[in-house]
Amino acid sequence: MCLFCKIVNKEIPANIVLENENFLAFHDINPKAPVHVLVIPKLHVDSFNEVTGETMAGMTTFIQELAKELAIDTNGYRVITNVGENGGQEVKHLHYHVLGGAKLKWGHFSDADPKDYL
Ligand code: AMP
């Protein structure tokens, strides 16, 4: 069973912010911003590559509700999902990073020259 499935099953503790029948939001153990919460579907999905539109519809509503709960909806926030090796995905259970609580920087994504891909 994967790490996030164990959190869903309460086999591993997590600092839960919001939960409903299908989704769970908990604080990232290694936060990269004042607010850094992970959102996962309770049913295991490997990554964004496999997620259905139906799950995404529920996820969207859940993240909107979460942003209000965290009081970051007005000032703004960022929603990210890393996919696969190049995306830097470490945990192979679909998760969205919800980051906020401060003005976020737009990072240095790679050492490759973007112009090489035009
Ligand atoms: P990613 O690199 O997109 O797969 O992100 C995985 C995230 O999971 C990282 O930001 C980790 O800090 C976070 N993480 C790993 N283990 C835990 C845990 N037990 N509880 C909360 N967050 C975790």
Image (spheres, rainbow, N blue to C red):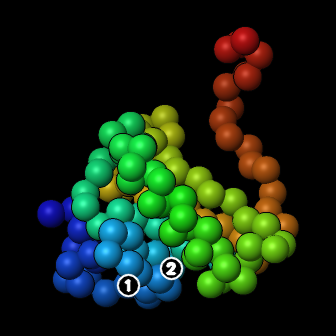
> Mark 2 CB in 8 Å range of ligand 1?
yes
* Closest to the observer, 100 or 62: 62
Sequence-first tag of 1 and 2: 1
> Mark 1 CB in 8 Å range of ligand 1?
yes
Residue 91 point in image, percent of width and height: 35, 56
Residue topped by disc 2: 27
Residue drawn at x 38%, y 78% as measured from the top left: 20
Residue type highlighted by circle 1: Ala
* Closest to the observer, 89 or 52: 52
Any part of residue 88 in sight = no
Residue 99 point in image, percent of width and height: 66, 67
Question: Is disc 2 surrounded by few (<14), some (14 to 19) or many (20+) residues within 10 Å?
Answer: some
* Closest to the observer, 54 or 23: 54
Residue topped by disc 1: 14
Kindly indicate whether the residue at mark 2 contacts the one at mark 1 (C-beta within 8 angstroms): yes
Q: Is 91 placed above or below 25 here? A: above
